């Protein structure tokens, strides 16, 4: 035992001295020597102390983060990035946001120095090499002390200029240009929409005829795509044209009736019919519809209404209606001596065109605005009115019509409405609030006057302008309705609708 102990005692100190030396790749050296030296208690402890000393000399070796720690670190970085972007959007001074491990933040970060504000932590922290240590914890983001800059004043909230009672009628503003229109919209439809929007084509019948003629050109230039049938695809193609017209101005009752008729006609086209023949038949149907429902109907109505006009009558009318104008012209051609009173209102002043046309023919015409109704109504013997639509509950026409009809009723003057059957509807309306059309308020401003009281109405607080297009005249104020089917009371409108539908 003595020789072995002496040999072992001589060996261990020399190995310990060798372990304490600082050599490159210390960990490899320790591992190789661990394989050569027997695993005794003394040598194991010495090797462990030597390994720790080498690791401390080389610096801590960082281990890779676990999946959970990576998620927490990414989440903290994301929160810091969002906070920085929010500060930037609000116009506040930029803030350094640092997200890292606990050991990354210096103790003096955020403290005031002797010469200025707090030192950013991003400039005082030590650089990190590699990934974070396995035992590191994710710290919360911190920020610099913001500078005392003047806050940016918030923009004042824009006042809502819509009238609350009619707020449901305000939709998208009317289209003023063809910009943004779909590529499938036909050029004829593009032109028609702008003409209706600018009141170049005005009136229910004129808009209906213009729409049908535009659809006729759409059908003529239409080509059925492959793997499609004309009845199905043409209906979809027309829908894009209708959407564009609605964006320019809401469609009238007569236009809605014509659209339904045309779609039914397209759906009834036989799939086996040649495309050229089907298109020709549809175009002929449109021409027939315009001739029967508008052109011939207006002539019949004018002849029937003339039966109620006598020599010496003073006829009052409101705004401009094409069928009323045709009735008055027919009475003048028959040699009846009549006088016409045209009542008009802002902003369209449609009655000016009617008064000018009748005066050019040689009729005696008196022109007045709505505020003079109480004066001119005393001279009238009959009142002839046009219609935008006729319901069983009353007359739906240009705003101001109800005022004229009520004034006539008060003066015991008969009120006669001239209306084509395509303007009749089964819709029921008891007021002008639920269904109506709101025109742009700018139309109420008198053009050409710089000092107009309404020139800067949008800047006046608590001032709202309402420009309604139509009003409802209750049926009790209408004496009779003249259609191409005859003279009827307002309560018989549903009967005429059934007759026109069956025919």
Image: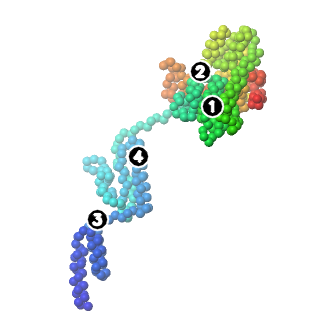
What whole-number distance in Å separates the C-alpha atoms at marks 1 and 3? 84 Å
Question: How many numbered discs sit on the rendered protein?
Answer: 4
Residue with the mark numbered 2: 348
Q: Earlier in the sequence, mark 1 or mark 3?
A: 3
| Disc 4 element | helix
Rate crowding at label 1 as few (under 14), some (14 to 19) or many (20 or more) other CA atoms within 10 Å: some
| Disc 1 element | helix
Q: Identify the residue shown where x is 30% and y is 56%.
A: 127
Residue 108, percent from left and from top: 30, 55
Q: Identify the residue shown where x is 36% and y is 59%.
A: 101
Q: Identify the residue shown where x is 76% and y is 28%.
A: 496
Question: Mark 4 touching mark 2, by CB under 8 A?
Answer: no
Residue with the mark numbered 1: 219
Rate crowding at label 2 as few (under 14), some (14 to 19) or many (20 or more) other CA atoms within 10 Å: few
Q: Earlier in the sequence, mark 3 or mark 2?
A: 3
Residue with the mark numbered 3: 59
What whole-number distance in Å separates the C-alpha atoms at marks 4 and 2? 52 Å
Q: Nearer the viewer, mark 1 or mark 2?
A: 1
Residue 162, percent from left and from top: 56, 31
Q: Identify the residue shown where x is 70% and y is 23%.
A: 291
Question: Mark 1 touching mark 3, by CB under 8 A?
Answer: no
Residue with the mark numbered 4: 85
Q: Nearer the viewer, mark 4 or mark 1?
A: 1
What whole-number distance in Å separates the C-alpha atoms at marks 1 and 2? 34 Å
Q: Earlier in the sequence, mark 4 or mark 1?
A: 4
């Amino acid at each position: 035992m003595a020789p072995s102990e002496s040999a072992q005692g001589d060996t261990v100190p020399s190995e310990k001295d060798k372990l304490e030396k600082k050599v490159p790749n210390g960990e490899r050296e320790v591992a190789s020597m661990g394989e050569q030296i027997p695993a005794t208690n003394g040598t194991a402890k010495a090797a462990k102390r030597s390994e720790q000393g080498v690791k401390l000399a080389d610096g801590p070796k960082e281990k890779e983060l676990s999946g959970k720690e990576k998620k927490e670190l990414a989440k903290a970085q994301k929160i810091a990035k969002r906070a920085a972007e929010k500060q930037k959007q609000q116009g506040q001074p930029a803030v350094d946001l640092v997200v890292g491990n606990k050991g990354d933040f210096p103790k003096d970060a955020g403290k005031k120095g002797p010469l200025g504000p707090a030192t950013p932590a991003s400039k005082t922290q030590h650089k990190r090499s590699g990934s974070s240590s396995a035992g590191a914890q994710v710290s919360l983001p911190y920020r610099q002390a913001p500078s005392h800059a003047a806050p940016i004043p918030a923009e004042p909230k824009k006042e809502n200029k819509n009238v609350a009672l009619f707020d449901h009628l305000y939709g998208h503003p009317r289209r003023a240009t063809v910009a943004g229109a779909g590529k499938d919209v036909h050029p004829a439809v593009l032109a028609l929409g702008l003409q209706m929007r600018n009141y170049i084509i005005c009136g229910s019948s004129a808009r209906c005829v213009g729409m049908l003629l535009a659809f006729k050109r759409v059908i003529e230039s239409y080509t059925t795509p492959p793997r499609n049938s004309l009845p199905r695809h043409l209906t979809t193609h027309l829908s894009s044209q209708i959407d564009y017209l609605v964006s320019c101005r809401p469609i009238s009752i007569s236009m809605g009736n014509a659209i339904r008729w045309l779609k039914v006609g397209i759906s009834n086209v036989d799939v086996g019919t040649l495309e050229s023949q089907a298109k020709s038949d549809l175009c002929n149907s449109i021409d027939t519809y315009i001739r029967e429902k508008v052109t011939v109907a207006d002539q019949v109505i004018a002849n029937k209404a003339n039966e109620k006009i006598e020599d010496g009558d003073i006829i009052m009318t409101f705004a401009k209606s094409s069928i009323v104008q045709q009735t008055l012209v027919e009475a003048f051609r028959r040699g009846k001596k009549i006088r016409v009173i045209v009542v008009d209102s802002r902003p369209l002043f449609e009655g000016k065109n009617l008064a000018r046309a009748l005066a050019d023919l040689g009729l005696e015409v008196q022109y007045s605005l709505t505020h003079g109704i109480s004066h001119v109504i005393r001279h009238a013997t009959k009142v002839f009115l046009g219609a935008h639509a006729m319901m069983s509950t009353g007359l739906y026409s240009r705003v101001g019509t109800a005022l004229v009809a009520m004034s006539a009723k008060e003066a015991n003057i008969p009120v006669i409405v001239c209306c084509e059957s395509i303007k009749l509807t089964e819709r029921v309306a008891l007021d002008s609030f639920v269904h109506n059309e709101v025109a742009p308020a700018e139309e109420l401003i008198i053009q050409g006057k710089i000092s107009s009281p309404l020139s800067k109405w949008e800047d006046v607080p608590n001032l709202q302008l309402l420009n309604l297009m139509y009003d409802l005249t209750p049926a009790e104020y209408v004496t009779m309705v003249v259609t191409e089917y005859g003279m009827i009371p307002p309560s018989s409108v549903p009967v005429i609708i059934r007759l026109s539908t069956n025919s």
